[in-house]
Image (spheres, helix red, strand yellow):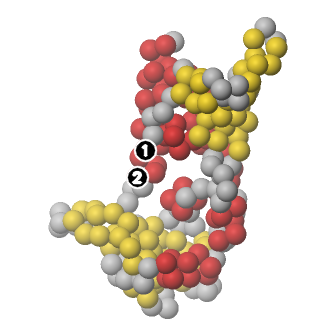
Amino acid sequence: MKYKYLRGSKDSREVFEFDISKRGQYITTCVVDVDLLLCGIKTFPCGNGDDFKLTGQQQLDILELVAAERRKITSGIEIKTMESWYGSGLNFEDYCFPGDTVGEDIVDYFVNVVPPVTLRYDCVQAGEEHSCERDDDGKYQATYTTFHRTGDGRCRFDGYCFKGENQNRVEKTYSQQRFEKRLAEAREEAERDG
């Protein structure tokens, strides 16, 4: 089956399309909403009004293609900006990774969405908590989306850090965990169907 990836945008969702044919004759096109697939949905609508249930192997194929397409979208960008982020069709967790250089416009976005918890020339932390993680003493603390200014005046995304710190405390975001979980489930189902 040949899949066609369509990245999300402000007006559309991230999807894969594929055609269904019988004996070489085109019947219809089906659309798989990636976010719904990541939520565990396995049946998707087709243009002729029918629904199509994906096999484990088809789910696995699509998820592996999603990972490859997202890598193409997020890699090789020297400075990630609001324009490139919006153009990616991805959420921030899937687009920016700790260590990425970002434009001032991304830092300004996080400063202006919710009043920051830390606002210094060298460190900015968004005001909304990202998650709660264990600190070195075993106690849970809130983490915040964190940026710092490098020596050359650029801004770097540090990850999700405790208040006043620049050390990433989140190994994998919820979005990454969800993706990996669904990929593992699809692999298991594909092996069972084998």
User: Relative to 167, does residue 125 appear above or below in the rendering?
Assistant: below
Image marks 2 and 1: residues in contact by CB distance under 8 Å: yes
Q: Residue at position x 62%, y 79% from top? A: 105
Q: In screen coordinates, is 142 left or right of 182?
A: left
* Residue furthest front as drawn: 49
User: Relative to 126, does residue 51 appear above or below in the rendering?
Assistant: above
Callout 1: helix, strand or loop? helix
Is residue 169 visible to us here? no
From the top left corner, tell me how far across and down residue 45 is, in percent.
Answer: 61, 30
Mark carried by residue 174: 2
Q: CA distance from mark 2 to mark 1?
A: 6 Å
From the top left corner, tell me how far across and down residue 98 is, in percent.
Answer: 50, 65
- Between 8 and 130, the residue placed more toward the observer is 8
Q: Amino acid at mark 2?
A: Tyr
Q: Residues within 10 Å of mark 2 (few under 14, many from 20)?
A: few
Mark carried by residue 178: 1
* Residue furthest bottom as drawn: 121
Q: Residue at position x 45%, y 67% from top? A: 159
Q: In screen coordinates, is 170 left or right of 175?
A: left
